[in-house]
Amino acid sequence: MVIRKYIAATEEEATKLAKEDLGEDAIVLNVKQIVPKGVFKFFKKATVELTAAVDDASEKEEKGEEFPDFSKLQEAIQETNAVLAKDAQAKEKAEKERAEKEEKEKKEMEARSRQILTEEPDEDKKLSKEGGDSIDIEARLSNLQDLLEKQLQAEKVENEKKEEEDNTNQPYFDLIRKKLIDNEVEEGYVDQILEDVSEGVGKNANLDTILAGVYQKIVLKIGQPHLIDIKTKKTKYVFFVGPTGVGKTTTIAKIASTLKLSKKTRVALITSDTYRIAAVEQLKTYANILGIPLKVVYSPDDMKEAMEEYREYDLVFVDTAGRSHNNREQREDIRKLLETVDEANKEVFLVLSATTKYKDLVKISSTYAEITKYNLIFTKLDETDTIGNIYNIHMITGAPLSYTTWGQNVPDDIGKIDAQSIAKQLLGGNG
């Protein structure tokens, strides 16, 4: 339930505010008159404080939000529940046998303790001290202490085992864990999510509660997308960097056309990708279709000239050549090009393919982190069935997620990162 307070001149106005904010299903819980106090109370008017509430489900319905469809995961849960029900009798029998075994061991421990304390010492072990006391009592006490320690340790292990068995929602966590790992989310991150959720729910929490907790945790970890700010006072230069073949040029064309056509943003293009065959021609084709200027640069000095020419534009997109993250000289070329623009007027987007191997993604993102701060764009989502690497790289780098692409159509097949959609897909729901 969502509970909020509203302050207005009259009760009617406060009620109207509540209905506009929470919807027609809002319920008034309390109405309180607020009378001004102090020296200036005669110059102030009384107000009304109204407390209203609405059910979460109503609010979600009003906003058009849908709870994730986890049908596949729920089918697996139902199968697990059937197995658990089938094994109930076996567990009950095992519990009874364990209790009998514990009772037997306890009686044996007690008997052994009494024997240690009462048995007569061997003659050859008696070493009398002054006053007639035998040091054999020390040996007996030592034996008794060892016996008690073993008993305590056995009880501790047994309690931990019993506590684990009492945790009836563990099968749910196990299946969710498997689903996330199948989606290639790193095992360490999976365990961290499940541990956080486990601490917040009871041992007997149902499937919906656990799923909702994991879903919300993933959404919070991904956060809001970082998009290109088009409200700039000075010309902003947006650099797109990344390996060869990830789709930088096509991504630039998609974003540029969207901003040009729907936002009426003044956009210009620069390309330094003079290494790849037909790269300049590809971007020139897009520029001609959109009616925006394009300039080719070969060095940092050329970049400075282009900046002078484009100072009247809102955004200038810079397409860089795909560089090997293992080549130091090529990395330096990127760094020098980026350094031609002040930090205040620059944004950098690292473009990565969702189909790239995880180890390579880690290496690439680490290498570019040594050069500059960046935001993340993932391409080719239509070419993979697992998207765990999006979550992994975001967590490793701490870089904001921005856009995703899933095809070659310009200006379509692109969108901002949707944390809710990613969370649903990772959990086996409908994204």
Image (cartoon, grey):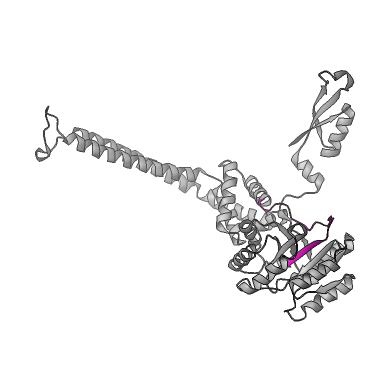
Q: Give 103 or 423, whichever is nearer the viewer.
A: 423
Q: Residue at x 54, y 52 (%)?
A: 83
Q: Where residue 380 appears, x then y in whole percent?
A: 71, 68
Q: Magenta stretch?
A: 221-240
Quadrant including the C terminus: bottom right
Query: Does the rendering let one see residue 108?
Result: no
Q: Is residue 37 above or below residue 104?
A: above
Q: Is residue 177 left or right of residue 306?
A: left
Residue 295 image offset from top left, x and y in percent = 82, 73
The N terminus - image quarter: top right
Percent position of residue 265, x then y = 87, 61
- Is any part of residue 285 visible from this angle? yes
Main SS of residues in magenta: loop
Residue at the extreme bottom: 277
Magenta stretch containing residue 232, yes or no?
yes
Answer whether residue 270 is magenta in the image.
Answer: no
